[in-house]
Image (cartoon, rainbow, N blue to C red):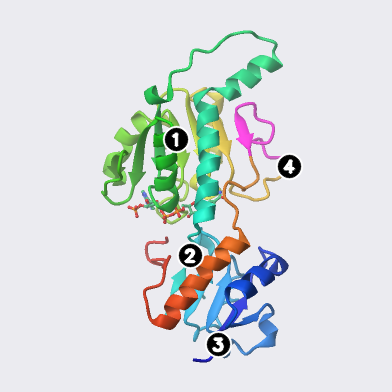
Amino acid sequence: MRPFNILFVTAEESAERWREPLSAALPGERLYFDADEIDPAEIDIVLTAVAPSGALAPFRRARLIQSIWMGVETLVADPTLPPDVPLARMIDPSMTRAMVESAVAHVTAAHLQLDELARQQREARWEPLRNPLASERTVGILGLGELGRAVAEGLLGLDFRVRGWRRTARRTQGVECFAGEGGLAAFLAKSEILVALLPLTAGTRGRIDAKFLDGLPAGAVLINLARGGLVNDDDLLRALEAGRLRHAVLDVFNVEPLPPEHPYWHHPRVTVTPHMAALTNPRTAAAFIAENVRRLRAGEPLLGIVDRGRGY
Ligand code: NDP
C-alpha cells in the first residue's frame, strides 16, 4: 500500500518540536510541514490543533483530521471544516497522567487551605487551621470523561470523597455520580472543592455563572483546568468578593495569554497558572497518532472520534 501523505498544519505548536517525534513514529509515511508543498487533494491525514477558519476547507478528500490537542472546540466550531472527514482528538495517557498530577496538587492545596496559610504568613498571623482529613472532604468533578475519571481515581487513592457530574447517567467505580441538569443542584450542594474538566461546547460555555456558583457550599474552591470559556468571569469575581467562594485556581482563561490588566492576576483569592495543567507531549502524542494511522490502514475503528453534533 502507498504511504499516507500526512500534513502537520497549525500555528499553535512549533513544527520543529514535532518533526522528529512524528518521523520516528511514522517511518513509512510521507510527512509534510508546509501546506504549499503538496496539492490539498493529495493529503490523507491532517494533523492540527487550531487552524484559522477556512484553512482546512481544501482537505475534503482527507481520510482523517487528527487534533494534536485533547480539546477540539475551535475545530468543531469551524463551519468550513470538511463535514465528511472524521475528526479525532488526542487521547494521550501521559497527558492524562499530567492532568492527574496537576489536579491532585491543586485539590490537596485547597483541602489543606494553603491559600489561607499564605495569607496568614503575609500578615504575620499565627492561627493553626483545623483541617478535616481527606476522607471527610468532598470533591466534585465536572465531567467524568478521560480526564475526569482519571482524576477521580487519583483523588480516591488519597481517600477523598469524590462525586462527579456528566451529561449521561453512567456509573464510575467509587464515585457518587450525578447526571444532566436534573442532577446538577444535588451535585453542587456538597462539592467543597470543584474541579472543572468539561469540554467547551454550546452546552457548557459560560455554565459556571452566578447561579451555578450560588449552588456550591459557602467557602468552596473552584479549580478550572479545562477551558476558560466555561466561566463567566464577572460572576466568579463577584462570588470571590462576596466570600461565597474562598478561592479559585484558574489554569485556563477566556482570553489567553491572560491580559496583564486582568483582575485575576493580582486577586488575593485567585491562583493563576498559564494553561499548563496537561501540555501535549509530541513524543507520546506521536505514538497515539501512529496508532490511529495503523487503524486507518487496517480499517479498524479510530480512537478519539469526535461527535461534532455533541461538540466533544
Ligand atoms: P471527554 O470528552 O473525555 O469527557 C468530557 C466529559 O464532560 C464527559 O464526562 C461528558 O459527559 C461531560 N460533559 C460534556 N458536556 C456536558 C454537559 N453539557 N453537561 C454535563 N457533562 C458534560 O473530555 P476529556 O476528559 O478528555 O477532556 C476535558 C477537557 O479538558 C478537554 O475538552 C479540554 O478542553 C480540557 N483540557 C485541558 C488541558 C489543560 O492543560 N488545561 C489539557 C487537556 C484537556 P458524558 O460522559 O456523559 O459524555
Residue bounds of the magenta highlight: 260-272
Q: Residues within 10 Å of mark 3 (few under 14, many from 20)?
A: few
Report which residue position mark 2 lands on: 89
Q: Amino acid at mark 1?
A: Leu
Q: Amino acid at mark 4?
A: Pro
CA gap between label 1 and label 2 equals 25 Å
Q: Amino acid at mark 3?
A: Pro
Report which residue position mark 4 lands on: 260
Instruction: Tell me whether the residue at label 3 lies in contact with that at label 1, contact meaning CB atoms closer than 8 angstroms.
Output: no
Instruction: Tell me whether the residue at label 3 lies in contact with that at label 4, contact meaning CB atoms closer than 8 angstroms.
Output: no
Q: Residues within 10 Å of mark 2 (few under 14, many from 20)?
A: many
Locate residue 261: give its quadrant. top right
Residue at mark 3: C-beta within 8 A of ligand 1: no
Report which residue position mark 1 lands on: 194
Q: Secondary structure at mark 2?
A: loop
Front-most of residues 250 and 301: 301
> Foreground mark, 3 or 1?
3
Q: Residues within 10 Å of mark 1 (few under 14, many from 20)?
A: many
User: Vertical placement of 154 versus 11: above or below?
Assistant: above
Residue at mark 1: C-beta within 8 A of ligand 1: no
Front-most of residues 99 and 67: 99
Q: Amino acid at mark 2?
A: Arg
On whether residue 40 falls in the magenta region, the answer is no
User: Vertical placement of 310 versus 172: above or below?
Assistant: below
Q: Secondary structure at mark 1?
A: strand
On whether residue 268 falls in the magenta region, the answer is yes
Q: Earlier in the sequence, mark 3 or mark 4?
A: 3
**Main structural element of the magenta stretch: helix, strand or loop?**
loop
CA gap between label 1 and label 4 equals 26 Å
Report which residue position mark 3 lands on: 3
Q: Residue 218 in the image: x percent, y percent?
A: 43, 23
